[in-house]
Image (cartoon, rainbow, N blue to C red):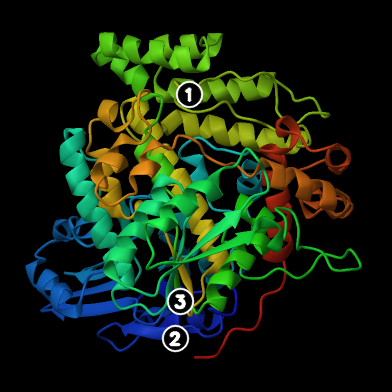
């Protein structure tokens, strides 16, 4: 459900009936652009200063989000657009993360980002196509109902491509990342077109580092140039520290936050303090993790009842399991006057590369692949049977996906445990083995199996090789996860931003040769080379990373009885998707990684989400 101040926008067809449909949009939605007929074209509730509009002749362009584009630059771009293909380069020309809405010739074009951080959804009402940047806003406008199959799929902790793009609403379709929606102005006709392709990985490490440094500098400048108070994460890792150091070169008055985790195995604070010592112009705020609600805390009142939930993501999201905690971090930034908070999310996925690249190298450069694999074996131990099998396996994506569907039917889960059967895949496969919770009903398993089998008949991988497919899948997965995280905190007065998921930054990282971007001999060599003159020298030696496991275990122990109570009247059970008994049993057990870290949070998030998604919406404003 969209919160009272949550940003969003919709694209309306140039038709008299669209005005009537627009009355179902959330309160506070206002016209942003109009068709030449005078009817509303784009309507929304947008962040002030994050909309730039220009036109030249018959071409009209609107950029919505964080960018370095000005009206003058946008007008120059509009003057150079002769055909829809001229829009393709704009996503990676400007710094930032944004939607592009364009009227070129006799067609409307709406595109998000290549990472999936900014999405576009579409659906039809009375034969007319509508589009929006949020699935739930569009679902309310169209009167769409929930999709049981999509909800069943969301009970799995991860999904193969393209099932993760399936929305939880019937008649609401997601446009794939890197693809734009193309509409006729009257909404009668629609299609999609690719505007972004992953670049050929031809740059050396040094060439890519130069380009990455420039892209990150521009990304940070685009966000800090005309914004009010800016805050940042400073975890002590390479990613957030890089952005903080770059921001400190652009402006003063920055505040950076570090959470002090009591887990002795977590050395984030040590490294954050090392970094802060080199950035005296940055106000460094350290706060204990116990200042925040726990990962599963903050949902219940003193009487044990579930508190009202609002401003939810537009789909079930694991981030929802720690929504009060995420919002408490937001509130700390707001208390320091922040209007924009910059995080380092996405850096891990862009800078480490996917292990399946060794599957590709084994076929193109076998000697190098064997050398890398020997090093990995020395560091992590001998590879297991699935890893060796998947390295030698050359099955197509469709064949692999069909085999996963067959395995799902054969390996029935044990109701006392969360995953179904033994792990069948390794990091060298097209994707991880599906983990099916033991509490899913036979009906839910049937819905999932049918969806897998239907998808396997026509599915195409994100790239021809497993390494590049794995890279893109991980990037789109983190783009989806961070989008959901941002939806929990963003308002028209405060937004959170993740520069590593900008299209320009993404494009540069993927253009570097994968065997140089990620190696078993060095941790994140691309960012270290790019910002060697910016990052504190000591930080370049860090190879550790905190995981928050102790905090999760402590919070689960504190709240597990309240969480178990949710499944005494489970909405998922009412839909016939889960058997509550095994779930209640799971919440009686002490926390363990095996039973509680993947399948349980996905189911809990679905339960929390659907309780609000099915709640009556507030009356929309008449326009």
Q: Looking at the image, which is closer to me, 285 or 80?
A: 285
Instruction: Tell me where residue 276 sits by quadrant.
Output: bottom left
Residue 25 percent location from the top left of the image: 53, 78
Disc nearer the start of the sequence (2/3): 2
Q: Is residue 373 above or below residue 258?
A: above
Say if mark 2 contacts mark 3, CB within 8 Å.
Answer: no
Q: Looking at the image, which is closer to me, 98 or 552?
A: 552
Q: CA distance from mark 3 to mark 1?
A: 40 Å
Label 1, on which residue?
A: 427
Q: Secondary structure at mark 1?
A: loop
- Tell me if residue 99 can be seen: no
Label 2, on which residue?
A: 30
For the residues carrying marks 3 and 1, which lies nearer the camera in this image? Answer: 3
Q: Is residue 114 above or below residue 543?
A: below
- Would residue 85 be found to the left or right of residue 264 on screen? left
Q: Which mark is residue 416?
A: none
Label 3, on which residue?
A: 339
Task: Determine crowd level at label 3: few under 14, some 14-19, many 20+ residues with C-alpha closer than 10 A.
Answer: some
Quarter in which the N terminus is drawn:
bottom right
Q: Looking at the image, which is closer to me, 116 or 135?
A: 116
Q: Secondary structure at mark 3?
A: loop
Q: Is residue 496 above or below residue 580?
A: below
Q: Secondary structure at mark 2?
A: strand
Q: CA distance from mark 2 to mark 3?
A: 22 Å
What residue is rendered at 31% in x and 52% in y?
A: 179
Residue 245 percent location from the top left of the image: 34, 58
Task: Determine crowd level at label 1: few under 14, some 14-19, many 20+ residues with C-alpha closer than 10 A.
Answer: many
């Amino acid at each position: 459900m969209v919160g009272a101040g949550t940003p969003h926008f919709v694209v309306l067809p140039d038709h008299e009936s669209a005005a009537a449909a627009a009355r179902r949009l959330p309160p506070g939605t206002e016209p942003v652009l109009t068709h030449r007929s005078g009817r509303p074209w784009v309507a929304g509730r947008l962040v002030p200063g994050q909309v730039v509009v220009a036109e030249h002749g018959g071409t009209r362009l609107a950029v919505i989000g964080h960018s370095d584009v000005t009206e003058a630059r946008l007008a120059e771009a509009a003057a150079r657009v002769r055909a829809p293909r001229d829009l393709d380069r704009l996503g990676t020309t400007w710094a930032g993360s944004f939607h592009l809405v364009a009227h070129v010739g006799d067609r409307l074009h709406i595109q998000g980002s290549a990472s999936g951080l900014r999405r576009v959804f579409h659906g039809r009402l009375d034969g007319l196509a509508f589009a929006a940047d949020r699935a739930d806003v569009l679902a309310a406008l169209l009167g769409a109902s929930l999709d049981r199959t999509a909800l069943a799929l969301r009970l799995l902790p991860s999904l193969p491509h393209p099932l993760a793009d399936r929305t939880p609403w019937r008649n609401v379709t997601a446009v794939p990342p890197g693809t734009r929606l193309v509409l006729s102005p009257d909404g009668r006709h629609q299609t999609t077109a690719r505007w972004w392709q992953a670049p050929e990985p031809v740059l050396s490490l040094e060439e890519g580092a130069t380009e990455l440094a420039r892209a990150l500098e521009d990304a940070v400048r685009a966000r800090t140039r005309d914004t009010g108070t800016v805050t940042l994460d400073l975890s002590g890792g390479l990613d957030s520290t890089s952005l903080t150091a770059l921001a400190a070169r652009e402006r003063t008055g920055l505040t950076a936050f570090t959470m002090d985790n009591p887990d002795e195995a977590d050395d984030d604070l040590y490294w954050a303090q090392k970094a802060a010592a080199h950035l005296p112009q940055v106000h460094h705020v350290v706060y204990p993790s116990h200042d925040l609600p726990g990962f599963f805390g903050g949902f219940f009142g003193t009487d044990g009842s579930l508190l009202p939930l609002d401003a939810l993501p537009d789909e079930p999201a694991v981030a929802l399991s720690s929504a009060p905690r995420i919002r408490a971090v937001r509130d700390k930034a707001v208390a320091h006057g922040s209007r924009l908070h910059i995080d380092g999310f996405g850096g891990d996925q862009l800078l480490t590369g996917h292990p399946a690249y060794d599957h590709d190298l084994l076929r193109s450069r076998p000697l190098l692949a064997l050398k890398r694999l020997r090093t990995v074996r020395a560091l992590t131990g001998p590879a297991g049977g699935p890893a060796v099998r998947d390295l030698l396996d050359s099955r197509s994506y469709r064949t692999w996906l069909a085999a996963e569907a067959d395995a799902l039917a054969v390996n029935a889960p044990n109701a006392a445990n969360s995953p179904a059967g033994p792990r069948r895949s390794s990091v060298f496969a097209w994707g991880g083995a599906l983990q099916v919770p033991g509490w899913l009903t036979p009906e839910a398993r049937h819905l999932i199996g049918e969806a897998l089998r239907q998808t396997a008949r026509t599915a195409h991988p994100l790239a021809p090789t497993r390494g590049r497919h794995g890279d893109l899948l991980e990037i789109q997965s983190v783009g989806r996860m961070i989008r959901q995280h941002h939806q929990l905190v963003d308002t028209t007065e405060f937004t959170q931003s993740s520069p590593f998921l900008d299209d320009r930054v993404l494009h540069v990282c993927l253009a570097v040769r994968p065997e140089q971007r990620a190696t078993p001999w060095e941790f994140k060599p691309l960012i270290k080379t790019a910002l060697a003159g910016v990052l504190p020298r000591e930080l370049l030696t860090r190879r550790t990373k905190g995981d928050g496991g102790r905090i999760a275990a402590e919070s689960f122990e504190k709240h597990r009885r309240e969480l178990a109570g949710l499944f005494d009247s489970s909405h998922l059970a009412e839909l016939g998707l889960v058997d509550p008994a095994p779930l209640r049993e799971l919440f009686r057990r002490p926390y363990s990684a095996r039973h509680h870290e993947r399948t349980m949070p996905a189911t809990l998030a679905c339960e929390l989400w659907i309780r609000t998604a099915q709640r009556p919406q507030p009356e929309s404003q008449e326009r």
